[in-house]
Amino acid sequence: MYRSKINKSRRWQIVAVVGVAVTLAGIGLGVASAAETKTPTVTCPDVKITVSIPAQAQNEVNQNLALLKTQIDEANKRIVSTQGQGGANFIQNAILGPLKEKRFATISRIETAIGRNAPKPNLNAAGLSGCTLNQNGGGATAAPTTVAATTAPGGNLGILTNSCDTSKLPAHDGFQKGDRCVSTEFGEVASAANDASLLITQAPRQVNRNQAFTLRVSTRNLIRDRFLAAGQGGYYVESSVLRNGIVRGHFHTACRMLASTNTAPAPDPVPAFFVATEDSKGGRTPDSVTIQVPGLPQAGTAQCASWAGDGSHRIPMMERANQTPAMDAVRIQVR
């Protein structure tokens, strides 16, 4: 009897201990479940677009802004679906790392889209691509953005177009062909004091037919080291480029015979003389170049002109509209 009571007491104690263990386990499971509701979320920097967005780029910019939000949403979903997987650095290596690369590429595409029809902005893609983890959950699940007005500079002036997107002409291919649309951007423009200037400083008043003569041409703020051969597809394919604030290019000289001095001449005839000067000289300080003309075969009034060109043969842009372009012309009587 005594032994039986002892056994019953032990059985009760064992059952009681098991019951406590189950109860404690239940409490432990309840605490873990509450903690799991605080799933970490991704928090990313604000992408601020403070420049004007050209109309041609608006759709592409909007698509990439929406993609930034989608990327964060997908990262948060993956955090939920992969809980308990990997080690301590799983989220950083498998989620935040790839998200950073995606955001960098997306922000860079926004910069490129704007830069096709306006100065390319620096949105700080490297600085804004990295995201952090909010361990308490509830972090930003969207990609907040600050977007500037969509009107491009000069948009209130009734601009007809600023790209070839609306042109019905075929694209220019770098060769000397008309009825084409040139999509090459203008490029860099110097400040007014550094804009290119040119002057014909010496020329004869009259010469005989087929008599050789010289012209003296002075240039300022023109580095004569860029000349893309137009006959080889280098026409209108390079944007203007500055070096130390000075345009890089060359200058042309041509002489044509005038049928009349009272009306503008036809623009299409090939000139009697033409040469391009690219001698790797020139710069901020004015200098002079001697142009050798072998002679003009026709009697009459000749117009000899010199004009600066950038690498793609365009007269360099000026800061202001009331500045005289880098060009000059003289008339020579041919007997």
Image (tube, helix red, strand yellow):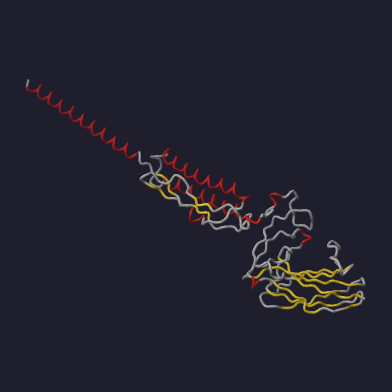
- Residue shown at the point (75%, 54%) measured from the top left: 173
User: Does 28 appear above or below 291?
Assistant: above
- In this picture, residue 39 sits left or right of residue 187: left
- In this picture, residue 118 sits left or right of residue 90: right
Q: On the image, which quarter does residue 282 sit in?
A: bottom right
Residue 120 at x, y percent in the picture: 59, 57
Residue lying farthest left? 2
- Residue shown at the point (78%, 71%) measured from the top left: 306
Residue 91 at x, y percent in the picture: 42, 45
Please count the marks in the image. Answer: 0
Residue 219 at x, y percent in the picture: 72, 75
What quarter of the picture does the N terminus occupy? top left
Residue 280 at x, y percent in the picture: 71, 72
Q: Nearer the viewer, residue 114 or 162?
A: 162
Residue lying farthest front? 157
- Residue shown at the point (61%, 55%) measured from the top left: 152
- Residue shown at the point (39%, 44%) measured from the top left: 138
User: Does 97 appear above or below 240?
Assistant: above
What quarter of the picture does the C terminus occupy? bottom right
User: Does 332 appear above or below 64?
Assistant: below
User: Does 95 appear above or below 51?
Assistant: above
